[in-house]
């Protein structure tokens, strides 16, 4: 059986689908925290918090359409990809883009995407750009931690910065196989530019946005960080499909897996925000 691929569905499409579909044809899953679910949820949705998705989704009939949503579509995108990787026999796996905010017609923050690899054709160029993005994301997390009033959460965000350094080391290992003139990791990391983050976001714009966030800063930041990690995950998954050698494809898949691990760490920070 071919693997079911995650697709986005917007709020209008979901309403149309739910109006015409039979109740047994789909499972609508809210992956937020219980406190959020109690405050408001889409009628008919069951609650499976993100941290429980992999262990609990098979308690239900999964041989139908699975639809995941959260507040803004970021946590649910991770949930959908986790279920996708489980290889369960779902007919379709959908993520509600914009989450319950779009369902309720609320305005969503605009996080731009940039095609950072459009002029990169060699694997060495792609890996170098990915290396620079890891540094940019690390600098972003260090800057973001200073805006967090809760010291424990600030420490968690700083730990994300350390993960980016470790991820950069993995990329460096593969990059050295392509270029023997790079020298040592510490020197390259120190001199690499930090202007662009994972997924191609401008670090300057990203820092500006977190400094201007309103409302619950912890939740807003957490979902922003999750978006960043998932863009990187999506990038590496796509690069693995385009890779010209098995070794390169394996390298990109390993990087994608690590980005998914980073996303899990961010999801735990969001969970703490609701605690």
Image (cartoon, rainbow, N blue to C red):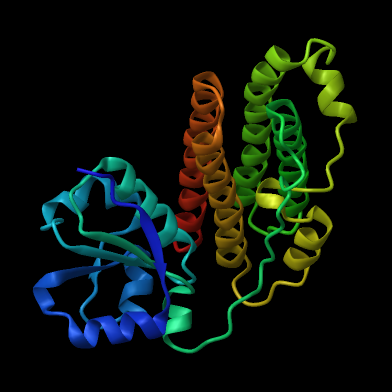
Q: Position of residue 242 (x, y in %)?
A: 54, 37
Q: How many marks?
A: 0
In the image, is 102 to the left or to the right of 113? Answer: left
Q: Position of residue 208 (x, y in %)?
A: 81, 65
> Which image quadrant: the N terminus?
top left
> Which image quadrant: the C terminus?
bottom left
Taking depth in this image into account, of 241 and 59 the one nearest to the observer is 241
**Based on the displayed image, in which of its 4 quarters is residue 47 positioned?**
bottom left
Q: Tell me: residue 128, above or below residue 88.
A: above
**Based on the displayed image, in which of its 4 quarters is residue 46 positioned?**
bottom left
Q: Tell me: residue 210, above or below residue 13.
A: above
Q: Position of residue 274 (x, y in %)?
A: 45, 63
Taking depth in this image into account, of 158 and 119 the one nearest to the observer is 119
Q: Residue at x 49, y 24 (%)?
A: 250
Taking depth in this image into account, of 259 and 2 the one nearest to the observer is 2
Q: Residue at x 68, y 76 (%)?
A: 214
Q: Tell me: residue 174, above or below residue 46.
A: above
Q: Residue at x 85, y 12 (%)?
A: 181
Taking depth in this image into account, of 151 and 251 the one nearest to the observer is 251
């Amino acid at each position: 059986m071919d693997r079911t691929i995650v697709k986005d569905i917007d709020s209008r499409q979901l309403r149309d689908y739910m109006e015409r579909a039979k109740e047994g044809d789909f499972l609508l899953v809210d992956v937020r925290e219980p406190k959020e679910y109690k405050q408001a949820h889409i009628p008919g949705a069951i609650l499976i918090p993100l941290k429980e998705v992999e262990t609990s989704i098979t308690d239900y009939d999964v041989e139908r359409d699975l639809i995941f949503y959260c507040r803004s579509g970021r946590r649910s995108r991770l949930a959908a990809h986790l279920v996708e990787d489980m290889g369960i026999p779902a007919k379709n796996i959908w993520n509600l883009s914009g989450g319950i905010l779009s369902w309720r017609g609320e305005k969503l923050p605009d996080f731009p995407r940039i095609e950072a690899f459009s002029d990169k054709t060699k694997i060495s160029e792609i890996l170098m750009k990915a290396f620079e993005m890891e540094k940019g994301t690390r600098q972003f997390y260090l800057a973001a931690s200073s805006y967090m009033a809760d010291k424990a959460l600030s420490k968690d965000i700083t730990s994300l910065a350390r993960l980016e350094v470790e991820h950069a080391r993995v990329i460096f290992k593969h990059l050295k196989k392509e270029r023997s003139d790079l020298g040592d990791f510490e020197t390259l990391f120190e001199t690499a530019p930090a202007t662009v983050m994972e997924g191609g976001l401008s670090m300057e714009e990203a820092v500006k946005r977190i400094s201007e966030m309103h409302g619950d800063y912890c939740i807003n930041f957490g979902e922003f960080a999750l978006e960043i990690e998932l863009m990187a995950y999506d990038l590496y998954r796509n690069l693995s499909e385009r890779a010209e050698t098995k070794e390169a494809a394996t390298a990109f898949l390993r990087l994608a897996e690590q980005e998914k691990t980073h996303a899990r760490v961010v999801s735990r920070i969001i969970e703490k925000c609701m605690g």
